Image: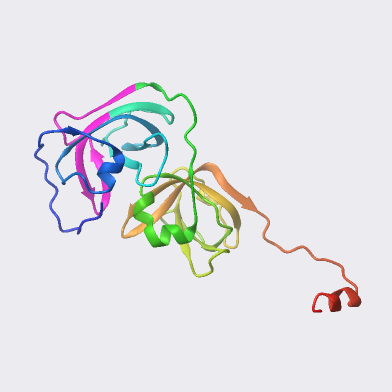
């Protein structure tokens, strides 16, 4: 749930109540509430936290868990989590480190697969919040229109919806392999939010790079004329 950046985060714990990630993302909690999520699946790990989702994967079913230090989890782990609901510059998170009763408990490996949600660049532009922190696959054909900047961020434009753009970031993906004019058929990862923009964090190797050149086709003059009949 997005709130104004000027809202102060409440760091004093209030009584906990069990709920789901979807409840959290759709506004059932107030900032500072202790959130308890049981049996979520880890979908992406960073040095200071991790993304997790409910099973089955769905819009609003993903969230970022901030642990401050290495979280001690791996992709595919089944976890129980307790922490305080916070909005970090409008990015919804469960903050384990500020909750005196917070915890991350690894229950084991999740049995079965979590499949990414198929989504288009236009859908993300219209309602990115529904997919914030979710495990998604962008299904558009895309072309790189801005090469990686100093922060490892690059921008693509949709072939299906010209004028619709998406930023990508290099946390798991090697941005040195990205070039202006590269074409993609898909890209899979987690949707993060920072500095007022949604960014896809692609998983390593999970961008479908394709040849976007149009092959030359030898046609006779008569065949060319027939195309316009």
> Please, is residue 163 above or below residue 130 in the view?
below
Please name the residue shown 25% across and 55% down the image.
Answer: 2
Identity of the residue furthest to the top in this view:
108
Tell whether position 113 is magenta. no
Please name the residue shown 37% across and 26% down the image.
Answer: 78
Residue 170 visible in the snapshot:
yes
Q: Position of residue 94 (x, y in %)?
A: 24, 39
Pick the front one: 60 or 103: 60
Name which quarter of the figure residue 3 lies in. bottom left
> Please, is residue 155 above or below residue 170 in the view?
below
Q: Name the image quarter holding the C terminus.
A: bottom right
Please name the residue shown 85% across and 79% down the image.
Answer: 225
Please name the residue shown 19% across and 44% down the image.
Answer: 29
Q: Position of residue 102 (x, y in %)?
A: 19, 30
**Range shown magenta:** 81-106
Q: Report the predominant secondary structure element of the magenta stretch.
A: strand
Q: Position of residue 141 (x, y in %)?
A: 59, 58
Residue 149 visible in the snapshot:
no
Pick the front one: 54 or 158: 54
């Amino acid at each position: 749930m997005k709130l104004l950046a000027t809202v102060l985060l409440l760091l004093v714990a209030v009584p906990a109540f069990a709920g789901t990630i979807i409840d959290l993302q759709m506004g059932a909690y107030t900032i500072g509430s202790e959130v308890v999520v049981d049996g979520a699946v880890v979908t992406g790990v960073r040095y200071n936290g991790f993304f997790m989702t409910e099973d089955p994967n769905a819009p609003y079913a993903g969230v970022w868990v901030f642990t401050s230090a290495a979280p001690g989890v791996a992709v595919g782990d089944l976890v129980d989590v307790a922490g305080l609901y916070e909005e970090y510059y409008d990015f919804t998170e469960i903050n384990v480190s500020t909750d005196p009763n917070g915890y991350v408990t690894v229950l084991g490996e999740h049995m079965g697969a979590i499949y990414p949600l198929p989504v288009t660049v236009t859908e993300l532009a219209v309602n990115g919040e529904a997919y914030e922190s979710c495990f998604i696959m962008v299904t558009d054909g895309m072309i790189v229109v801005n090469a990686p900047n100093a922060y490892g961020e690059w921008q693509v434009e949709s072939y299906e919806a010209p004028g619709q753009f998406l930023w990508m970031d290099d946390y798991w993906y090697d941005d040195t392999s990205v070039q202006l004019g590269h074409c993609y058929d898909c890209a899979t990862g987690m949707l993060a939010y920072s500095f007022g923009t949604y960014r896809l964090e692609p998983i390593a190797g999970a961008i479908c790079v394709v040849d976007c050149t149009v092959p030359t086709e030898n046609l006779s003059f008569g065949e060319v004329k027939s195309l316009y009949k």
